[in-house]
Amino acid sequence: MTTARPSAVPPPFGRALCAMITPFTEAGSLDLDGAQRLADRLVGEGCDGLVLSGTTGESPTTTDAEKSDLVRAVREAVGERASIVAGVGTFDTRHTVELALAAEKAGADGLLAVTPYYSKPPQDAVEAHFREIADAAGLPIALYDIPGRTGTRIEPQTLIRLAEHPRIVAVKDCSYDFLAAQKVLARTELAYYAGCDEHNLALYAVGGAGYVSTVANVIPRHLRSVLDAFDAGDTTGAARLQQRATPLIELMMSAGLPGAVTAKAVLGGLGLPAGPVRAPLRPAGREAVDGLLATHESLTTG
């Protein structure tokens, strides 16, 4: 028996999206071959969308050319089997528009635009920033609300107004404001993606579109199974699967190290494409790596 989803809006980029790491060589250059191999694996293990050059993709330390090269390489690897959403957000509206146009030219299916950071613009400026990007680009856009990193919320009323734009179609929600997310869901047709892995099932259950997950780099099939169980009407099973992933989610996302660092630590330990992180990030220490790998093994073999 299946249950009807609370939201009737089809997810614009799929349900199970991975915020993919950007593999580098040991010398620190972009590893396009590794990116293609990782992308192919992620799609084969249940991801129907890949978000490139986001927070986990270390976008602050990749060049504009590297971002475009990454989109082209991953598109070649996955073809039309998964959507590709390119992170283009910066604190500079003009630069963001340039990145959006470049991502479109490189073959992306959608764009992820984060709130302008550091300068802390007021809400009317935030709204104008996103509208300018949406007016300039020809691709659908997901707004990335992560005030813990940017210093600025996209307030619910701002999101409700921005939802009127035909190319603003989704939100990656890292606001940690579950009430606000439900308010916007109730008043718009924006597709809401959980950007914090501990919220994947909870947001999906109240009408969210799915998730954009850092942890999916290392357990893509398990996280997809949470959504599949819920859609099949097995809500108890979905909850159990989400709970089983909680120790790894906590270690990867809430133990003091950035998700790019922890995801690369696990991938590297499994012999999968990852490579080092770029400064100012630093690799995880031996104790952290051992703990991550032990927790991953417990989840995947238990």
Image (tube, rainbow, N blue to C red):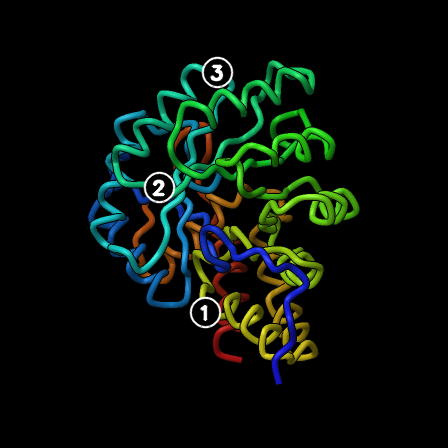
User: Which residue shows up at 61% across the image and 31% down it?
Assistant: 162
Q: Which of the 4 image quadrants contains residue 230?
A: bottom right
Q: Report, in whole angstroms, how far the alpha carbon at label 2 lies from the one at label 1.
A: 24 Å
With respect to residue 85, does 63 lie above or below? above
For mark 3, give the secondary structure: loop
Query: In which quadrant is the N terminus drawn?
Result: bottom right
Q: Which of the 4 image quadrants contains residue 124?
A: top right
Q: Whole-percent x and y of residue 299?
A: 54, 72
User: Which residue shows up at 67% across the image and 44% down it?
Assistant: 188
- Give the labeled residue for mark 2: 276
- Give the labeled residue for mark 1: 221
Q: Report, in whole angstroms, how far the alpha carbon at label 3 lies from the one at label 2.
A: 28 Å
- As drawn, is 108 to the left or to the right of 216? left
Whether residue 90 can be seen here = yes
- As drawn, is 72 to the left or to the right of 41? left
Earlier-in-chain disc, 3 versus 2:
3
* Residue depth check, mark 2 versus mark 1: number of the one nearer the observer: 1
* Residue depth check, mark 1 versus mark 3: number of the one nearer the observer: 3
Q: Whole-percent x and y of residue 223?
A: 53, 65
Q: Amino acid at mark 1?
A: Arg
Earlier-in-chain disc, 1 versus 3:
3
Q: Amino acid at mark 2?
A: Pro
User: In this orientation, which residue lies closer to the viewer: 146 or 219?
Assistant: 146
For mark 1, give the secondary structure: helix
With respect to residue 181, does 105 lie above or below? above
Query: In which quadrant is the C terminus drawn?
Result: bottom right
Disc 3 residue crowd, few under 14, some 14–19, many 20+, Cα 10 Å: few
- Give the labeled residue for mark 3: 92
User: Which residue shows up at 23% across the image and 54% down it?
Assistant: 77
Q: Report, in whole angstroms, how far the alpha carbon at label 1 lies from the one at label 3.
A: 37 Å
